[in-house]
Image: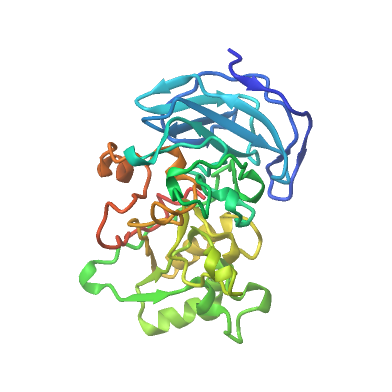
């Protein structure tokens, strides 16, 4: 069944990460499944599912391999349990995409839908490109007396990172989390970049990266200290705050998450998300668990005057119970009073 397809181009070529650089027209759209959420490659095609309880319409936007040109929009006509879904049998890993979600713009009721804003999918496993800030990223007209009660019609796609479909295959072999008893656990908190950036025995090209953390000098040091678990400060995709960039600064610590399932690529020496998995496997082999510092009580979208990058434009209504967002999308908006820390081995939950 071919549904809701808007045409814009054709052709396809391979990229360095083993996927495809898309410049093709999707001609077949099947109903797909509501679960799992996100973009799921099954070896034959890709299933897309996005949760939004209050949207009127959901469009999947497909981009070329550079992420600069929108090629096509596909209207999702299937909706199950507030999940909008479709299956693209022609789609392959490497496809770049985002969403435009239509619905009421009624901030006073908690609805902030604005289809002029390209949205990052909460379940995206890989984000391509940086966030290039502009006033177009806000759902309202910045500087207006009505503030967020006004409405902005500028397209934000040019400066928004694109989601990338991945092939999650990885050779885990006989890897298992060490599962050290809590009473024997010795936790070492670290920042991926800071841990190896100035280490003289780590190859210069690997310093400050996942691969650098997995080198023998770092791993041997942790073992000698008697460390049984390393707790990493945020490794999820995050943004550099606009006010920091305007001062010539960056967000070093990473507590401004944009994608909870996508590894932060500034820490990858290869540009491949498998580098993080390799790091975890190496640490497990040394008997070291990997814990992730995850803060769910705020995201890069900030408060009501923040930008519309993802969650806010998908469904930000207070009528959705916090437990729905926590269980379906691992982030909430001002619903938690304290940071949440995730004890995670990444063997089972690493999908990036």
From what the image shows, is residue 160 above or below residue 118?
below
Q: Where's the N terminus, which quadrant?
A: top right
The answer to whether residue 344 is left or right of residue 99 is left
As displayed, is residue 295 above or below residue 72? below
Q: Residue at x 33, y 43 (%)?
A: 325
Residue 126 lies, with reference to residue 32, above or below; the image says below
- In the rendering, at what x and y percent does residue 170 appear? 54, 49
Question: Please, which residue is most extreme toward the front here?
Answer: 145
Is residue 265 in sight in this rendering? yes
Question: Which quarter of the figure has residue 295?
Answer: bottom left
Q: Position of residue 44 (x, y in %)?
A: 60, 28
Residue at the top extreme of this rendering: 1
Q: Residue furthest left?
A: 183
Q: Is residue 301 left or right of residue 158?
A: left
Say left or right for 346 vs 158. left
The residue sitting at 60% across, 84% down in the picture is 201
Residue 42: x %, y % from top left: 54, 32
Visible in this render: residue 328? no
Along the viewing direction, whichever of 319 and 40 lies nearer the viewer:
319
Q: How is the protein colored in the picture?
A: rainbow
- Residue appearing at x 37%, y 57% in the figure: 298
Q: Position of residue 248 (x, y in %)?
A: 61, 74
| Horizontal side, residue 122 vs residue 95: left or right | left
**How many numbered discs sit on the rendered protein?**
0
Q: Nearer the viewer, residue 173 or 164?
A: 164
Which of the 4 image quadrants contains residue 180? bottom left
On screen, residue 105 above or below 129: above
């Amino acid at each position: 069944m071919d549904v809701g397809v808007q045409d814009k181009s054709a052709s396809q070529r391979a990229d360095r990460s083993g996927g495809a650089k898309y410049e093709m027209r999707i001609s077949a759209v099947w109903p797909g499944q509501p679960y799992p959420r996100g973009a799921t490659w099954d070896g034959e095609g890709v299933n897309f599912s996005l949760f939004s309880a209050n949207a009127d319409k959901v469009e999947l936007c497909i981009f070329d391999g550079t992420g600069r040109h929108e090629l096509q929009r596909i209207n999702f006509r299937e909706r199950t349990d507030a999940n909008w879904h479709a299956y693209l049998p022609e789609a392959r890993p490497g496809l770049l995409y985002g969403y435009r979600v239509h619905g009421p713009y009624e901030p006073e009721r908690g609805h902030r839908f604005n289809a002029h804003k390209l949205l990052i999918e909460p379940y995206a496993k890989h984000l391509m490109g940086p966030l290039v800030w502009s006033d177009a990223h806000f759902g309202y007209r910045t500087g207006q007396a009505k503030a967020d009660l006004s409405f902005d019609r500028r397209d934000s796609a040019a400066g928004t990172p694109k989601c990338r479909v991945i092939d999650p295959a990885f050779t885990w072999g006989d890897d298992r989390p060490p599962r050290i008893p809590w009473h024997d656990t010795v936790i070492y908190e670290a920042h991926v970049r800071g841990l190896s950036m100035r280490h003289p025995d780590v190859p210069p090209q690997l310093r400050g990266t996942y691969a650098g953390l997995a080198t023998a000098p770092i791993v041997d040091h942790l073992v000698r200290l008697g460390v049984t678990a390393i707790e990493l400060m945020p490794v999820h995709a995050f943004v550099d705050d606009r006010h920091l960039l305007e001062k010539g600064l960056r967000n070093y610590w990473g507590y401004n998450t944009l994608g909870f399932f996508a590894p932060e690529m500034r820490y990858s020496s290869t540009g491949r998300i498998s580098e993080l998995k390799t790091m975890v496997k190496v640490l497990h082999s040394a008997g070291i668990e990997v814990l992730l510092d995850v803060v769910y009580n705020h995201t890069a979208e900030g408060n009501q005057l923040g930008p519309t990058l993802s969650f806010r434009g998908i469904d930000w209504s207070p009528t959705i119970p916090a437990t729905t967002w926590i269980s379906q999308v691992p982030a909430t908006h001002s619903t938690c009073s304290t940071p949440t820390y995730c004890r995670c081995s990444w063997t089972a939950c690493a999908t990036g």
